[in-house]
Amino acid sequence: MRDLGRRLAKLLRAGDLVMLSGELGAGKTTLTRGLGEGLGVRGAVTSPTFVIARVHPSLGDGPPLVHVDAYRLSGGLDEMEDLDLDVSLPESVVVVEWGEGKVEELTDDRLQVVIHRAVGDTTDEVRHVTLTGVGDRWSDTDASVLSA
């Protein structure tokens, strides 16, 4: 998942919204850690479950990474507005875990990443990842960098 995140970072630019979904332990934060490495941001990317959001500034000339965990947020975009993601989005890459039904209205363009793993089988570390680009931003994106 971390390696996939590093490769996926090559496709991302300021203004991108990435929505991650998958059951607990699927690898959402690990994927985001790889995104942070690929984007070259400062700070350890860890789960923002209790702080809701963390901003990781770029160490170079790339965009900052805003990492949000919406798991504990019960409301939709109204509750998310308190985080000012609409202000951060144009100059950042915003990654939202558990964002379904909460952040879609931020932009017409987003990348939805769904991670599936075998639940209950601790010996199976295989993940199946489905990426769906929504909007014009993703219509002509060459995803060949994701091939391992």
Image (spheres, helix red, strand yellow):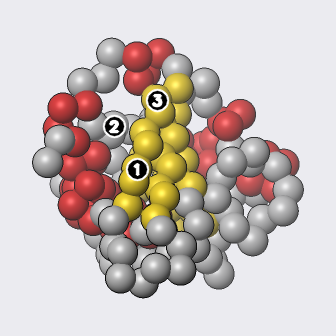
Residue 58: image location, x then y, percent: 29, 58
* Residue 64, percent from left and from top: 37, 54
The residue depicted at 84 percent of the width and 62 percent of the height is 74
Q: Is residue 65 visible?
A: yes
CA distance for labels 3 and 1: 13 Å
SS for tag 2? loop
Of 1 and 94, which appears nearest the observer? 1
3D distance between C-alphas at marks 2 and 1: 21 Å
Query: At which x and y percent is residue 144?
Result: 18, 32
Which residue is pictured at 30% across the width and 23% down the height?
Answer: 141
Label pair 2/3, CB-CB below 8 angstroms: no
Q: Is residue 13 above or below residue 27?
A: above
Crowding near the residue tagged with mark 3, few <14, some 14–19, many ≥20 C-alpha atoms within 10 Å: some
Q: Which residue is mark 3?
A: 133
Q: Is tag 2's residue or tag 3's residue first in the polypeptide sequence?
A: 2
**Hey, which quadrant is residue 43 in on the image?**
bottom left
Q: What x and y, as percent, mark residue 115? A: 47, 56
Marks 3 and 1: which is nearer the front?
1
Q: Residue at x 71, y 34 (%)?
A: 105
Q: Is residue 68 left or right of residue 75?
A: left
The amino acid type of the residue labelled 1 equals: Val
Crowding near the residue tagged with mark 1, few <14, some 14–19, many ≥20 C-alpha atoms within 10 Å: some
Which amino acid lies under the numbered mark 2 shown in the image of this protein? Arg
| 3 or 126, nearer to the observer | 126
Residue at 14%, 48% in the rendered image: 148
Residue that label 2 marks:
13
Which label's residue is closer to the chain start, 2 or 1? 2
Pick whichever, 45 or 147, lies toward us. Answer: 147
Q: What secondary structure is found at the residue carrying circle 3?
A: strand
- Visible residue check, residue 81: no
* Residue that badge 1 annotates: 129
Q: Secondary structure at mark 1?
A: strand
